[in-house]
Image (spheres, rainbow, N blue to C red):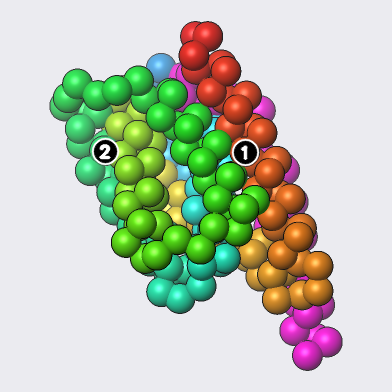
């Protein structure tokens, strides 16, 4: 049991360190993407809005447990791909940056509040936000030199960020861990407020 608790703590610290090592640039400010797979992998890691939303999806899934701990990290990339197609086709859509900021804010709130949503509700919330994230990157995708490689790299990075969130949520089984992850949720929500302020003022 002690080894399990130590493993959870180490895993959570590694995941948190991974998040903190990301760059400060917003993920959706660039208009020229350098190219293929490597650009796709690095792009979501360089933007705190996308990064925090992806980690939050995994972290909320860790709170909710089965089946959502596995379902949410699958639902998000799948629906995000649909949003990407909509973005590439320039289908009219509500302000994307506001939607992305709201996703960070809401996901932070549900984690901070330890909201135990039913499967259908949690899936619907995550899917709705996934469309906004996918739409934003779909609009950027045509400027990539290798759109297929970029898409594959981007999806893999997104899935990895979900796993990071699940890893951080592993400390929920340790004494005081739930309070810590809820505190992280509150910080994510505050970041969402900042992103929303920027999006509205842009």
Q: Name which quarter of the figure residue 22 lies in.
A: top right
Please, what is the dominant secondary structure of the magenta stretch?
Answer: helix
Is 35 covered by the magenta stretch?
no
**Label 2's element?**
helix
* The residue positioned farthest toward the bottom in the image shown: 1
* The residue positioned farthest toward the top in the image shown: 202
Q: Nearer the viewer, residue 145 or 92?
A: 92
Which residue is disc 1 drawn over? 189
Question: How far is disc 1 from disc 2 in space, using C-alphas?
Answer: 23 Å
Q: Residue at x 50, y 17 (%)?
A: 199
Residue 104 position (above or below residue 168): above
Question: Of the residues tagged 1 and 2, which is closer to the observer?
Answer: 1
Q: Residue at x 45, y 61 (%)?
A: 117
Is 22 covered by the magenta stretch?
yes
Which residue is disc 2 drawn over? 83
Q: Which residues are magenta?
A: 1-30
**Label 1's element?**
helix
Q: Nearer the viewer, residue 1 or 39?
A: 1
Residue 150 picture location, percent across and down: 36, 40
């Amino acid at each position: 049991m002690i080894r399990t608790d130590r493993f959870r703590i180490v895993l959570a610290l590694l995941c948190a360190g991974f998040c903190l090592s990301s760059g400060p640039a917003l993920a959706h400010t660039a208009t020229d993407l350098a190219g293929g797979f490597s650009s796709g992998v690095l792009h979501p890691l360089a933007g705190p809005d996308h990064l925090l939303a992806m980690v939050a999806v995994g972290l909320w899934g860790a709170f909710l447990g089965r089946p959502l701990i596995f379902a949410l990290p699958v639902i998000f990339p799948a629906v995000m791909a649909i949003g990407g197609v909509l973005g590439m086709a320039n289908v009219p859509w509500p302000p994307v940056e506001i939607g992305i900021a709201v996703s960070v804010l809401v996901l932070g709130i549900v984690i901070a509040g330890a909201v135990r949503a039913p499967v259908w509700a949690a899936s619907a919330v995550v899917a709705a936000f996934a469309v906004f994230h996918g739409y934003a990157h779909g609009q950027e995708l045509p400027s990539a030199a290798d759109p297929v490689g970029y898409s594959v790299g981007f999806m893999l990075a997104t899935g990895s960020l979900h796993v990071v969130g699940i890893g951080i949520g592993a400390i929920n089984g340790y004494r005081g861990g739930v309070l810590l992850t809820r505190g992280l949720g509150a910080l994510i929500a505050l970041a969402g407020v900042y992103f929303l302020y920027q999006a509205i003022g842009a």
